[in-house]
Image (cartoon, coloured by chain):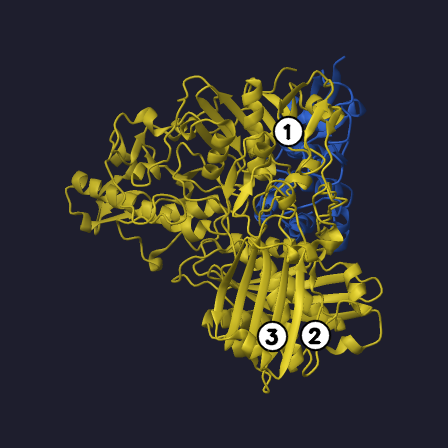
Amino acid sequence: MAIKISVNGEGRSTDAASDTPLLYVLRDDFELRGPKFGCGLSQCGACAVLVDGKETRSCVTPIAAVEGRDVTTLEGLPAWFAEQQQLATVPPLHPLQQAWIDEQVPQCGYCQSGMIIMAADLLSHDPHPSDEEIKKAMDPHLCRCATHNAIVRAIKRVAAAA
Amino acid sequence: MGTPTVTPPEHTRFTRSAFLKAGGALIVVIGAPAAVWGIASSGGDAPTTWPSAVDPSELDSWLAIHADGTVTAFTGKTDLGQGNQTALSQIVAEELDVPFQRVRMVMGDTASCVDQGPTVGSLTIALAGPQLRQAAADGRQALINLAAIELGAPAGTLTVRDGVVSRVGNASRRVSYGELVDGRVLGVAVPVKGKATGFGLTLGGARPKPVSKYRIVGQSVPRVDIPPKVTGEHFYIQDVRVPGMLHGRVIRPPGLGSRLLGYGKPTHGARVVRLKNFLGVVAEREWDAIQAAQELDVTWSDWAGLPLMDELYAYIRKTPSLEDTVVASTGNASKAIAGASRRLEASYTTAVQTHGSIGPSCAVADVKEGSVTVWSGTQGPNVVRSAVADALDVPLEHVRIVTYEASGCYGRNGSDPVTVDAALMSQLTGHPVRVQWMRRDEHGWDPKGPATVHQLRGGLDANGQIAGWDHEAWIPAFFETTIIGSVLAGRATRMPSLHLWEDPILYDIPASRQLAHYQGDIGSAENDGVGLISAWIRSPVQLQLTFASESFFDELAAAAGADPVELRLRGLSDPRMIAVLQAAVRAAKWRTRPSPGPDANAAGAVARGRGVATSLRGGTYNAAVADVEVDRESGQIRVHHIIVSQDNGMTINPRALKLGIEANVVQTVSRALYEEVEFDRSNVTSLDWAGYRIIRFTEAPTVDVITIDRPNERATGSGEPSCNPIAPAIANAVFDAVGIRLRSLPMTPDRVKAALAGAGTTTTTSDGVGSA
């Protein structure tokens, strides 16, 4: 039986086995490159996506668990933001993506999709977090290049402009 | 859903021979850059063999000038996330006098890029930078010569701006690079002076531009790889798919030397791939391959040849060396120490660490009869090309390595071994195979940053000056680095090692010695030379050596009652090192006094201290001042702030440099405080992020980066050397805070508490010899 989900605002279906983690459906079936395989254990956050607006580890989320729900990946963040903010047009980038460029955040960048997803979740319910609140919210996400400080600066840049 | 066929934009179809009929040609003229950036193909009309090496003496090996005025530059180097692509593009744009935006780079394709040596040791800007600069200077001169004919004016009267050649004083006489090359092939040879490939390759020819004329080099050009990385458009090696591809997963033995005795039927429709002890599964769907690998019933023999973890350092000391080398020696160190009025001795150890890439290593291989293409995240495309040829037992000319950026590696992680895994699985199945390691594979089987042991002895004269210094270090040599897949498959292939103890002691000491005991990997004597495979993490062996030597220097300063900065400055004579140290201590508002500081004898659980350290690595100077807090009850060290200074000669991109240093420093705090690979007698046991922890947001210190730009000095390594002074600066700050000396990395709460309880400290008396 095909499973239907909404990915970045588009209705999609997959014939993947129902216990297949969402990550592999997004990457292998839907050819999205934002979410990454990092650990498969929900320990690092590289695979993070938004499910109904909430940061979710796609590597341990069976596809059946998101049937009928809205999944947003890094690629869909601008449209998701436009909907959140009720903007007439979809901007080319989510403000966090622009801030990541302005602050030149990534080194290798492999974790950054998950980082931006987490930050988008954070700012969507807390637009003006303190430094400590940002760090606490981001703590479950790992960055081996150790760009933590640049990430915090980028989030603060968006929070300050909001 | 069928087999995924995401294919990356790339240059697979591109080879010079495809559009150059005869040899001896030059700046390549092709219609549009699209011809270079074709679509990936694993078959079709792609050539089946490639040259054993791309010829560095032909200009077209380095540059392609397109009719639209854009430029493609070719480099055997890769981008590991520190901005090599951007910085090398700046160098090429500068030297060719074209706008930065017009330069694109093809990196790490063995069929189209000169072998400039692997991307290691912070040597890309230092060594490959001058190679590309010279090639671009030769290209610029060739284009000016062509313009001289076109414009009917002597070359000496011409100037170039933004890719347009014009007469000085008469801008109406002009011709663009694109117009010059349109429809023509130039025969330009580049004089090769040094070795034909690798780090030693030296090019000659036209004189490069004087630094005073630079407009692009030295500017903080935004990194070209960042926008696609924040939108999901960037192609990592993990994103590469080719038609007809299967997903493979490896199944590694439980012990380093375990032998495969048997296996059951695979689940989920997967197929077993096996060659001797090399075992894996392939399936059309990735999730099927993952589950089948987990579920396959496999019987292995027992193997228990590793030392007990608790006995590791004693084991290292007693293991016979492969080679003993005096790295540097001045005067008679043992005599000077024996005759000193105060003598100190201490031993230092550093733990096994993992590269810990967030993305497990991945490769895609398509092995056909007579033609092998492997898409790899390797740092050393030409090195792994040989490894693949050996593993498959095919001629080198049949193998092409196409490199894509991988998850950050900071040294040789799983990228090379997984490249061989994919190649073996493709050869054994007859299909293209994509292999991505699982987390347990990367944590368990990436070559490990090895443990080291150090014995330091020093003596102070009656005036508190250092009279003698002796640093003995037990260091894994890994003259060869083993590729595990090949070993398991019985097709052993080894890769050369590159980095050993290089830089002599920083300070002017009348008598000193540095002695290296180079050893095999731990456990290797019990398993036919294959133990816990080693490959250095930033910065090869220097981080460990500097932790020991800069901590011990602090011990001598404390014994002499001297301020740690003041004693260092007394021993330094290199003005660049002095400037770097002074820049850091000035920014830290360092107050001159000996350590330990006032908190060491104060009441209260939490004590604060500051520490300093310096390092010199491959011509790059660093100093760091750490501000730490130690909780005597919990044993927790909290690093609040680090000031780090660096002089790497000429800086190509100041902002990218500073951000790279900042990240490198925070990563090193993680390695200094938290990171230690655990193992039992059979193998590594810390197989995920719970077992091997790294730093998190709430633990990251703030970092101030001070760079000293010296545009007239050669560019030296910039990415990793700043890791070297970090651990000793922290250890020295802990001593300053609470008066205990931590001599083992990582500096865990248990070690802090043990040291506070009196275990593991050195007693230093006026004529006694302390021991760790």
Residue at point 59%, 56% (across, down)? B475
Foreground of the two, B680 or B43: B680
Q: Which chain carries label 2?
A: B
Residue B65: % across, % down? 33, 36
Residue at point 28%, 45% (across, down)? B138
Residue A146: % across, % down? 64, 50
Q: The yellow chain is which one?
A: B
Q: Name the residue under label 1.
A: B277
Crowding at dot 1, Cα within 10 Å, few <14 / some 14-19 / many 20+, comes out as many
Tags 3 and 2 on a common chain: yes
Q: Which residue lies furthest to the bottom in this view?
A: B462
Q: Mark 3 points at which residue?
A: B458
Residue B302 seen anywhere in this rendered image of the structure: yes
- Secondary structure beneath dot 2 equals loop
Residue A21 seen anywhere in this rendered image of the structure: no
Q: Which amino acid does label 1 sit on?
A: Asn
Q: The blue chain is which one?
A: A
Q: Alpha-carbon distance for marks 3 and 2? A: 11 Å
Q: In this view, does B414 lie above or below B267?
A: below
- Dot label at residue B770: 2
